[in-house]
Image: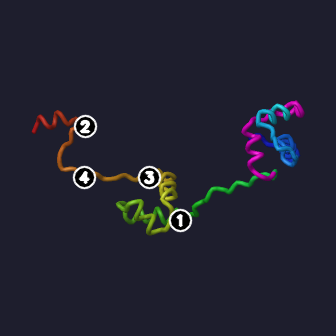
Amino acid sequence: MIYLTEMHKITILQMIGYGDRQLRRRTQAEVVRLYQEKYPELLPISQGTVKAVSGRGHVRQVKKNPPNKLSDDHKLDVMLMLEENPHTSSRQTVSALNISHSSIFRVLTENQMHPYKLVPTNDLAEDDFDCGRRILFL
């Protein structure tokens, strides 16, 4: 949505028909056309902009919450735990440190580490690399 002042948002609500005693409200396409006729010097708005302004219920700017930052202490705890026991699973790390699973993976990614799952096998499988030659040798 393009940046609109409170005055422009109120104008859009008036064009929709909020506050009028009419039973019929204008469609989003009609509001877009009326707005472009009234303010030809401004950037045109879209039907999504009209929908967002009318659905919000107020004309003030919406504040967005900043993303949750993991403190350096928590990052250090994760790295120390993995340094002490590199075979610790990510789920064990989550339960031991009481940090979310996504935060653990974010710390690992920042430090260029990646968890992997060991799959123990006793035999050669058909999809192993160069399997055909080794099976023939046996």
Find the magenta span and give its range. Answer: 36-58
> CB atoms at circles 1 and 2 under 8 Å apart?
no
Q: Is residue 79 above or below residue 16?
A: below
Is 90 placed left or right of 136 in the picture? right
Q: Quadrant of the C terminus?
A: top left
Quickly name the residue at label 2.
Answer: 129
Q: CA distance from mark 1 to mark 3?
A: 16 Å
Classify residue 66 by image quadrant. Answer: bottom right
Tag 1's secondary structure? helix
Instruction: Give percent across and percent down for residue 22.
Output: 86, 44
Q: What type is the residue that disc 3 sits on? A: Met
Q: Determine crowd level at label 1: few under 14, some 14-19, many 20+ residues with C-alpha closer than 10 A.
A: some
The picture places residue 124, in percent across and down from the top left corner, at 19, 43
- The circle on residue 120 is 4
Q: Residue at 81% of width from left, 41% of height from top?
A: 25
Judged by depth in the image, the label closer to the viewer, 1 or 4, is 4
Residue pointed to by mark 3: 113
Question: What whole-number distance in Å separates the C-alpha atoms at marks 4 and 2?
Answer: 16 Å
Asked which secondary structure carries label 4, the reply is loop
Q: Which residue is mark 1?
A: 74
Q: Position of residue 117 (x, y in %)?
A: 34, 53
